[in-house]
Image: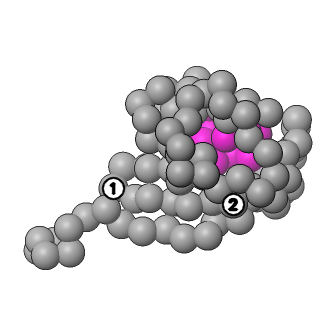
Amino acid sequence: MRLDKFLKVSRLIKRRTLAKEVCDQGRITINGLQAKAGSNVKAGDELIVRFGQKLVTVEINEVKETSRKEEASSMYTIVKEESLQDKNQPF
């Protein structure tokens, strides 16, 4: 399945056009390699997505063509979330 479609179906990103833009900006890696919107994803892949000042690492559990809202979160597991802010700077 295409990366942009997976991001939309799994509801990690709300709209497919937005998912494509995030991919085109170079903010997603698959298994450590820079990803494009058309990159293929499969179960077992690890995605690292940069949302603003936050890095989210996700492992793909399963790939479905469609999913209901209740099922969407079962398609992936969040491995870790980390802030990109410099810890030396005051808030």
Instruction: Give left or right: position of 36 versus 87.
Output: right
The magenta stretch spans residue 12: yes
The residue tagged 2 is 59
Question: Which numbered disc, 1 or 2, marks the residue that appears first in the sequence?
Answer: 1
Query: Which quadrant of the figure has residue 39?
Result: top right
Q: Is residue 75 visible?
A: no
Query: Residue 74 at what x, y percent from top left?
Result: 82, 60
- Left or right: 15 as drawn, with respect to 70: left
75 or 36: nearer the eye? 36
Identity of the amino acid at label 1?
Gln
Q: Which residue is mark 1?
A: 53
Q: Which residues make up the magenta segment?
A: 5-16
On the image, the x and y values in percent for residue 9 come to 76, 39
Please indicate whether residue 77 sits to the left or right of residue 89 in the image.
right
Q: 57 and 33: which one is in front?
A: 33
Q: Crowding near pointer 2: few (<14 within 10 Å), some, many (20+)? A: many
Tell me the residue at 66%/25% (across/down): 38
Q: Is residue 12 visible?
A: yes
Residue at 42% of width from left, 68% of height from top?
82
